[in-house]
Amino acid sequence: MHIQNKKRFILMTGALGVLIIIILVVTVLFLGRFFSKQEPVQTTPKATETTSSQTAQSSPAATTTTAAADNQTADTSTTTAPSTADPSDVLVLVNKTTNLDQNYVPADLVWVDLAGVRDTQMRSVAATALGELFSAATKQGLTLYCCSGYRSYATQKELYAQNVSALGQSEADLVSAKPGQSEHQTGLAMDVTAESVGFDLLESFGDTKEGQFVKNNAYLYGFIIRYPNDKTSITGYSYEPWHLRYVGKDVAKVIHDKDITFEEYLQSN
């Protein structure tokens, strides 16, 4: 190949090389900025806790939840006041207006040695009382199962985000607590289930023999159904016949006899 103007050829080749280098640099910078803006992927929680504190949880026979079209980002902002009460008090109020500190962990957590769909923990006083409730059920020919007890702030944060992703913000807020607002962090709450509902957490549990036993007898052992039917305007959550909260026998009896919520009891005392 004969090149008539070697100098011009060299200049053109050099200019072309510089142009290619500039294009490559711009491309790399653009891609770097693009990927740096991507949100981190939400990780799946450990197998021992796979759902929220206020929604149906996975179990040996649990069904999967279909993601709603309204796939929103979880709002975990804390706009409510921290609890002014001692978080270790069995009467501590934890709800949508009163939060636990994210670093709070009960000092007396124990593993619950009862039938369950997963290993879980509670505070010692609550675990002992729950054992008595389960024994009373057994004497009636009924078998209750633990489903979910203590959960940390971090675990609740993951579970709440999952529920918002699956249900949308509004629906999730009816069945799932934001981190810091879950009673499970107190170590005084336990979700219970039965084989009759496939070891799941369903409203229909309240209509089963096991659910009726819990409704009529839990207070004798210091527990209340924390989120009763038709009390959403007060508690902020939908009906959960499976969610038991330990408050002690005396207080539980008052709440049961008067058919009131925990919030109503605290307001009147």
Image: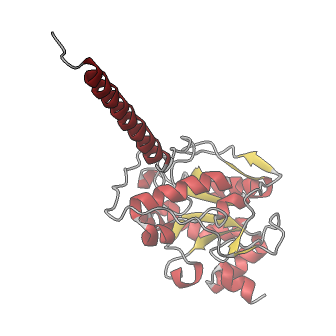
Q: Does residue 135 appear anywhere in the picture?
A: no
Is 183 in front, or is 145? Answer: 183
Q: Is residue 109 above or below residue 176?
A: above
Residue for point 60% across, 70% down: 225
Is 212 in front, or is 7? Answer: 7
Image side of residue 159 versus residue 256, left or right: left
Residue most toward the top?
1
Q: Quadrant of the C terminus?
A: bottom right
Residue for point 54% across, 40% down: 47
Q: Is residue 1 above or below residue 44?
A: above
Q: Is residue 49 above or below residue 102?
A: above
Q: Position of residue 207 (x, y in %)?
A: 44, 68
Rendering colour mode: secondary structure
Q: Position of residue 58 (x, y in %)?
A: 46, 49
Q: Is residue 92 above or below residue 150?
A: below
Q: Quadrant of the N terminus?
A: top left
Q: Position of residue 229 (x, y in %)?
A: 50, 77
